[in-house]
Image: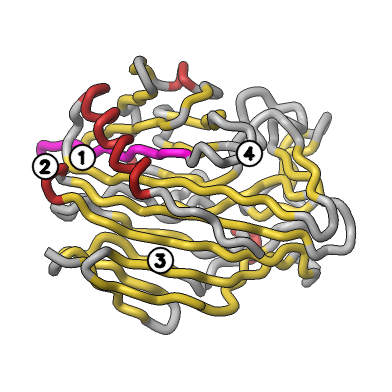
Amino acid sequence: MTLSLDTRPEELVVRHGEQELFRYVYVPHDAQRESPRPYFHPIRTLTGDVVSLYRPHDHVWHKGIALSLPNVGDANFWGGVTYVRDQGYVQLPNDGAMVHTGFDVLEADDAGVRVQERLIWVTQQGEHWFTEIRSIAVTADEAAGAWTLAFATTFRNVSGAEVVMGSPTTQGRENAGYGGLFWRGPRSFTGGRVYVPGQQGGDDLMGVRAPWLAFAGDHDEKTGSSTLVFVEAPENPDTPAKWFVRSTPFAAVCPAPFFDVEVPVADGGSLSYAYAVVVADGDGGLAGAEALAKIGEQALIRPVEL
């Protein structure tokens, strides 16, 4: 079956045959406190099982899969409260937005789906701090029961001053290095299995360095599991990635380039990252995750230079 792309005024819909795989909401209508930004949700397997969660009551700024960055200088492009050293989490007037400005590529053919998008990052005070080009590609592997979302981004500092990228951990909160391409899983995935090369675990793998990380969870209302494998491009800065991962109290994964290190971005400077997310029916254990990771490695795309 072929992949198709349905372009709508505020969202893109990708299908495999008649099965919707995901919606990419590029014009969200979220409150400023939730840092409005494009997101992928709902995300489904080839057989239709939903593997993402939108706006959970415990963290209303979690939106399926989204590029989410809590510490961009003193601005927050994650949403909600900001962790401040020696104060803890504080609600500040600093929740910015990633604003869609246009598409340069919208294509679908036998090779898959390809999208190239332009965005700007605007602070809550209306200041334009970053310009971004992101690329999205989708391929399917029916034999493996999986499809892959490839995601690449380049963002350039246009603020007029240096901006330091970080995380709550760089502000003093231990093991809270989240920030990057962040996924929030379904409620039923709580307590799921986490795989990295040569190892299975759970919350004990928080902060592990690995070229890929997989999360497998079980579904409510039916008997069955699904697996997502997150793969980092070897060209990314400071590889292999340091991973933010939780299986309790909820399922979440994020390759976190600023987990415990601050990265200054000079005015006019840029950063580029690329990842692939393989979405598969079933749970093949560690060996199955390794096989899916190889599919993700083949699907990686390169960031576009700004």
Say whether residue 226 is magenta.
Answer: yes
Residues at badges 3 and 2 in contact (C-beta under 8 Å)? no
Identify the magenta region: 223-232
Type of the residue with mark 3: Tyr
Q: Position of residue 50 (x, y in %)?
A: 25, 51
Identify the colour scheme used.
Answer: secondary structure
Q: Quadrant of the N terminus?
A: bottom left
Residues at badges 4 and 3 in contact (C-beta under 8 Å)? no
Q: Position of residue 245 (x, y in %)?
A: 47, 30
Q: CA distance from mark 4 to mark 3?
A: 26 Å
Helix, strand or loop under label 4: loop
Q: Nearer the viewer, mark 4 or mark 1?
A: 4
Residues at badges 4 and 2 in contact (C-beta under 8 Å)? no
Residues at badges 3 and 1 in contact (C-beta under 8 Å)? no
Type of the residue with mark 4: Pro
**Among numbered discs 4 and 1, the one appearing first in the sequence:** 1
Residue at 81%, 32% in the rendered image: 85
Q: Nearer the viewer, residue 11 or 238?
A: 238
Q: Nearer the viewer, mark 4 or mark 3?
A: 4
According to the picture, the residue beneath numbered tag 3 turns out to be 24
Residues at badges 2 and 1 in contact (C-beta under 8 Å)? yes
Q: Quadrant of the C terminus?
A: bottom right
Residue 273 appears in the figure: yes
Residue at 69%, 62% in the rendered image: 96
Q: CA distance from mark 3 to mark 2?
A: 26 Å
Secondary structure mainly formed by the magenta segment: strand
According to the picture, the residue beneath numbered tag 4 turns out to be 237
Residue at 37%, 46% in the rendered image: 277
In the image, residue 95 above or below residue 4: above
- From the viewer's perspective, is 235 left or right of 184? right
